[in-house]
Image (cartoon, grey):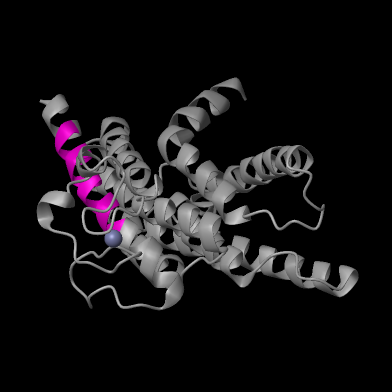
Amino acid sequence: MMVLEILAAAFLGLLIGSFLNVCIHRLPEDESLLQPARSYCPHCRAMIAWYDNIPVLSYILLRAKCRACGASISWRYPLVEAITGILFGASVYVHGWNWMGLKHCIFAAILVDLVFTDLETYILPDEFTLGGSVVGLVMAALAPANTRFLAFFLPATWPLWLIGVLEGAFAGCILAGLMWTGGMLFQKIRGKEGLGLGDVKMLLVIGVFLGLPATLLTVFLGSLLGSIVGGFYIVMSRKDWDFEIPFGTFLGFAAMMLSLFGDVFFKWYWKLG
Ligand SMILES: [Zn+2]
């Protein structure tokens, strides 16, 4: 029964989202994820009881306030939990209750962390970019991307898991390499940093999970969104044109779209051609 599997995935996503909130808060400040083991209020540092730590629900029941000190809890907490839950459910709906579904759930969790950490702190933690790339290579063996570029050049007799791993490694390295080179050139010409190393490492993990065709489309879509939304924000808020746009946030959003709709899009696209 597909509905039960989607609900199970969404429920798991809520719990993972709760954990991601801890990562988003602690990793940019180099705090340990394990110590303290329990969540605490960032304002008064009071430990949060399990019944006040239920994804989404506790936020509503507590009316967005800490039980101990009354400080307001950021709307980011229930938002991250809800989004992760929805993305897990959607990933299983699109890809199935299998390795491919699991791969896209893991990818969604990585992207949610990167999107919100970049938005709040302009930091893209290595734990998720580099660590995520290692996990992505394992998942590329278990569930190779459906759209592959490298496959055209590899002997058809090679096992699919190997082709999947090579495609992921190739896509990640090519795009991270191109972006790194582009950033270097920009810095040489303009004399200021255009792209952070975090963005480069983020492309690595996206490439490993999505393969080359979908990653190229992610970069295109992310840049387009970043320019339009970022430009609109700068004009509306009358910020300086030097205002740094959190590129990772837009890249992450685009990667989520490709993770869910990439296969459908490429099937449709190749029918046209
Ligand atoms: Zn508090």
Is residue 19 part of the magenta span, yes or no?
yes
Indicate left or right for 13 with 116 as reference: left
Residue at the extreme front: 69
As displayed, is residue 135 above or below residue 240?
below
Q: Choose top left, top right, bottom left or bottom right for residue 40.
A: bottom left
- Quadrant for the N terminus in the image: top left
Q: Position of residue 193 (x, y in %)?
A: 76, 70
The relative height of residue 98 versus residue 34 in the rendered view (above or below) is: above
Classified by dominant secondary structure, the portion drawn in magenta counts as helix
The answer to if 76 sits in the magenta stretch is: no
| Residue 52, visible in the rendered structure | yes
Q: Residue at x 29, y 53 (%)?
A: 70
Quarter holding ligand 1: bottom left
Is residue 101 shown left or right of residue 226? left
**Residue at left offset 39%, top offset 44%:** 75
Could you say where residue 81 lies in the image, as x and y percent from the top left?
A: 30, 45
**Residue at 32%, 31% in the rendered image:** 94
- From the viewer's side, name the closer residue of 32 and 5: 32
Q: In this rendering, does residue 97 appear at all?
A: no
State the quadrant of the C terminus: top right
Region rendered in magenta: 7-20
On screen, residue 93 versus residue 176, left or right, reads left
